[in-house]
Image (cartoon, rainbow, N blue to C red):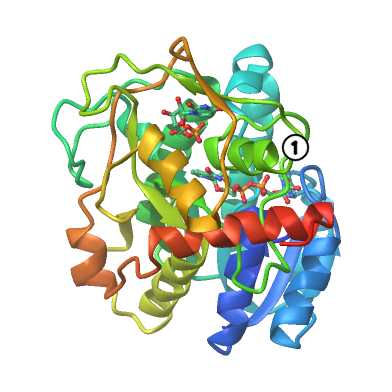
Amino acid sequence: MSNRKVLVTGGAGYIGSHTAVELINAGYEVIIVDNLSNSDRSSLAGIAAITGVTPTFVEADCCDREAMERLFAEHDFQSVIHFAAFKAVGESVAEPLKYYQNNIGSLVNILDLMRRYERRNIVFSSSATVYGDADVLPVTERTPRKPATSPYGNTKQMAEDILRDSVAAVEHLNGIALRYFNPIGAHPSALIGELPRGVPNNLVPYITQTAAGVRECLSIFGDDYPTPDGSCLRDYIDIVDLARAHVVAIDRMVEGRNKEAFEIFNVGTGRPVSVFELVHGFEEANNLKLNYKVAPRRAGDVTAVWADTTLANEELGWRAERELTDTLRSAWAWECHVRNIKQ
Ligand code: NAD
Ligand code: UDP
């Protein structure tokens, strides 16, 4: 079994492609499996252009038992990073079974194969959504989870529990759940980035598309929250910093430095930023004006959430490094790359 090989499920997607780059830069061999349900092959070309290495790519669905069994039989990776999942909160409310089937089904399949093929380490993409509307901020990993407010959020809570129970039952298995805060930005090369389909739900893609003229006007969802400027507070984490957190999580397990077989880490900056601050930060970083208006609150939004990152800082030896201004420049550079806009 090779401890330098990592299977990256969902590796053609936004976070997976950036993580593949950082894994390759750190000397890992990457095998990507993706069904391209929310991505395309351009990200694979981007990874190759940035690193000079073309990762092995298998087009398959992680819920497809036979295809995944073949993959495990053919490749001797010791570790898995499991990104593959659907992630649209609103869609998950309308089509819950699609989310339970894909997000839970794929994880169960992977864990069963890891058990049978004696693979050791798995990093799972969890989310700050598990904290819901927390009573105390910033949230630590010990902050109680709140009942999920969407089927998507529920899949993350259930998946954390499935992972914890599987790791407890299978002697050779180690797991780390990384709870991402709000990933934003793109690789500094502008060769990979986020490719939302249709109208973006997330703030930064909506901002960049508005700046590009694809959307007419950004709606700021609520200016009457109990925060300093009335808009919601979030912890926006640069995508390359987030990608690096996966590499250190894999290193930790490969080198046997994990203290428990199952661990959880917050991956954020520790700094709350309001929607207005982000919008004005984007304007200043890129020297442009954004068309925006204040709109009513969006259903389901929490007022504020940001990370206490002490555990990740001390245990993983990881911290967010990129300045928000640089991240917001990278988001715009990527949008310009996608739309063929001269900056
Ligand atoms: P993404 O949609 O860009 O990437 C997910 C990738 O998985 C896509 O390439 C998609 O084609 C693939 N995929 C989905 N189901 C699959 C399946 N059954 N088999 C094979 N491939 C499949 O999303 P992302 O933003 O990169 O998110 C990656 C992970 O991080 C997801 O689990 C997501 O829930 C989680 N997460 C994302 C955010 C965020 O804001 N982006 C925040 C917290 C957690
Ligand atoms: N938001 C907004 N306008 C948009 C999209 C998002 O004002 O078009 C706000 C949203 O209300 C939240 C913040 O931006 O306060 C981050 O939202 P996003 O959907 O990016 O991430 P979330 O924290 O909801 O997962």
Residue 222 at x, y percent in the picture: 40, 16
Above/below status of 132 relative to 4:
above
Q: Is residue 117 visible?
A: no
Which residue is nearer to you in this view: 224 or 245? 224
Residue labelled 1 has its Cβ within 8 Å of some atom of ligand 2: no
Residue shown at 26% from the left, 50% from the top: 271
Q: In this view, does 131 lie to the left or right of 47?
A: left
Q: In this view, does 295 lie to the left or right of 306?
A: right
Asked where in the image residue 92 lies, by quadrant, the reply is top right
Say few, some or many: other residues with alpha carbon within 10 Å of mark 1 (under 14 / 14 to 19 / 20 or more): few
Q: Can residue 122 be seen in this view?
A: yes
Which residue is nearer to you in this view: 133 or 235? 235
Above/below status of 270 relative to 220:
below
Above/below status of 83 relative to 296:
below
Residue 5 at x, y percent in the picture: 62, 81
Residue 147 at x, y percent in the picture: 34, 20
SS category of the residue bearing label 1: loop
Q: Is residue 45 left or right of residue 108?
A: right
Give the quadrant of the N terminus. bottom right
Give the quadrant of the C terminus. bottom right
Which residue is nearer to you in this view: 288 or 147? 288
Q: In this view, does 301 lie to the left or right of 140?
A: right
Residue 33 at x, y percent in the picture: 75, 61
How many numbered badges does the structure rendering display? 1
Residue shown at 80% from the left, 46% from the top: 64
Asked where in the image residue 178 lies, by quadrant, the reply is bottom left
Residue shown at 75% from the left, 86% from the top: 53
Q: Name the residue under label 1.
A: 213
Name the amino acid, label 1.
Answer: Gly
